[in-house]
Amino acid sequence: MLAIRLPEGIEHRLAELAAKTGHTKTFVAREAILEHLDEMEAKYLAIDRLEKVGKRWTLDELDKGVNLES
């Protein structure tokens, strides 16, 4: 279960799209979230990896099949 407060403008756009398409606001919001969730996960996980200190491999090392466990 998720409850969020939306700015009035976004709420209005959501309601209008739902009405025009015959879907519920919940359906439209769920579809919007699913549409962008993969991209957001990739972005924030990449930022997290860059911020954490750790071993980095070059493309050459990866091409040669370096043992990533060591």
Image: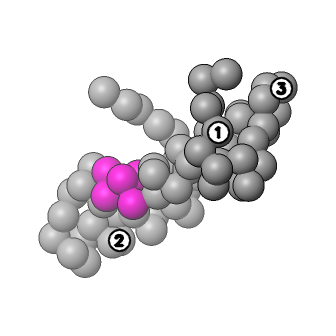
Residue holding disc 3: 53
Badge 3, how many Cα within 10 Å: few under 14, some, many 20+? few
Which sits earlier in the primary sequence, circle 1 or circle 3? Answer: 3
Q: Is residue 50 visible?
A: yes
Three-letter code for the amino acid on which mark 1 is drawn: Val
User: Residue at horizontal 75%, vertical 42%?
Assistant: 57
Q: Would you place residue 49 above or below residue 36 in this image?
A: above
In whole angstroms, how far apart are the C-alphas of marks 1 and 3?
19 Å
Mark 2 secondary-structure assignment: helix
Residue holding disc 2: 16
Q: How is the image coloured?
A: one colour
Q: What range is drawn magenta here?
A: 30-35
Q: Are marks 1 and 3 in contact (CB under 8 Å)?
A: no
Please tell me which residue lies in front, 26 or 56: 56
Which sits earlier in the primary sequence, circle 2 or circle 3? Answer: 2
Q: Would you place residue 35 above or below residue 16 in this image?
A: above
Residue 21, label in figure? none
Quadrant position of residue 52: top right
User: Residue at horizontal 61%, vertical 32%?
Assistant: 67
